């Protein structure tokens, strides 16, 4: 993972390297059983050099905390592309094609039990299928390679539309139940009874 991290931090494989302040390679426990995949770093992440540290990231951490998860122990978090697309535009096909091998390698190295994709772009790009609809697939278990995968709304969508929070909480509850089933039957969440 450290070798991969160095490769990502020095990568110039697509034009996003020209406008980045930091390549955001990922964060969390390399041996985590949950891997969380977002779309791309935003302005705060690019400035600070860590993934999901802006308002979306703070909301995500609140949700993780309610589930009894921490980045340090339970989660490794990364993005489809590691450098910020200017003005937070959706990453282009070429950019995703250049960057996705890093993420696939990270998945292989972390080898989680559960993958969570955040939002439509992460879902479509990971499966390389532009027809996948987050509104239809959120909350439904899918398979990506040998991994169980739960698509959920991106936290920025929850900030724009708080009405999505209720459904999203149900999706995260499923993740906690699955974590108890596959990893730790005693996993504690103050908000999700056994
Ligand atoms: S987005 Fe990915 S492929 Fe493009 S420069 Fe950054 S690390 Fe390299």
Image (cartoon, grey):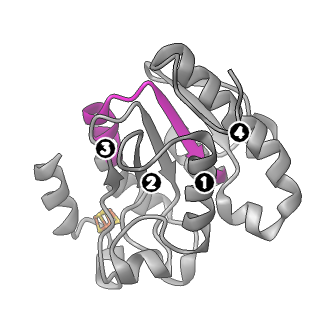
Report the residue marked by disc 3.
29
* Quarter of the view holding residue 176: top right
Residue lying at 66% horizontally and 25% vertically, measured from the top left: 141
Observer-nearest of 25 and 84: 25
Mark toward the start of the polypeptide (4 vs 3) = 3
Mark toward the start of the polypeptide (1 vs 4) = 1
Q: Residues within 10 Å of mark 2 (few under 14, many from 20)?
A: many
- For the residues carrying marks 3 and 2, which lies nearer the camera in this image? 3
- For the residues carrying marks 4 and 3, which lies nearer the camera in this image? 4
In the displayed structure image, the side of residue 44 where residue 59 appears, left or right:
right
* Residue 75 drawn above or below residue 115: below
Residue 164 in the image, given as x and y percentages of width and height: 83, 53
| Disc 2/disc 4 C-alpha distance (Å) | 30 Å
Q: Residues within 10 Å of mark 4 (few under 14, many from 20)?
A: few
- For the residues carrying marks 2 and 4, which lies nearer the camera in this image? 4
Residue 13 in the image, given as x and y percentages of width and height: 25, 65
| Disc 3/disc 2 C-alpha distance (Å) | 18 Å
**110 drawn magenta:** yes
Report the residue marked by disc 1.
121
Mark toward the start of the polypeptide (2 vs 4) = 2
CB within 8 Å, label 1 to label 2: yes
The region drawn magenta spans: 103-119
Residue lying at 44% horizontally and 54% vertically, measured from the top left: 80
Mark toward the start of the polypeptide (3 vs 1) = 3
Tell me the number on the disc at residue 191: 4
């Amino acid at each position: 993972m450290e070798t991969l991290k160095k490769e990502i931090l020095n990568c110039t494989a697509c034009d996003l390297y020209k406008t980045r302040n930091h390549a955001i390679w990922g964060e969390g426990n390399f041996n985590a059983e949950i891997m969380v995949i977002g779309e791309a770093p935003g302005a705060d992440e690019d400035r600070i050099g860590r993934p999901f540290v802006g308002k979306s990231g703070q909301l995500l951490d609140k949700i993780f905390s309610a589930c009894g998860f921490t980045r340090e122990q339970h989660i490794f978090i990364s993005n489809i592309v590691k450098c910020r697309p200017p003005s937070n535009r959706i990453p282009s096909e070429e950019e995703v094609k250049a960057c996705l091998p890093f993420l696939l390698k990270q998945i292989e190295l972390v080898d989680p039990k559960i993958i969570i994709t955040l939002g439509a772009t992460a879902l479509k790009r990971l499966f390389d299928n532009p027809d996948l609809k987050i509104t239809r697939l959120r909350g439904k278990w899918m398979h990506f390679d040998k991994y169980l995968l739960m698509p959920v709304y991106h936290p920025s969508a929850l900030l724009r539309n708080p009405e999505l929070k209720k459904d999203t909480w149900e999706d995260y509850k499923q993740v906690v139940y699955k974590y108890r089933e596959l990893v730790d039957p005693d996993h504690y969440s103050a908000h999700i009874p056994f």
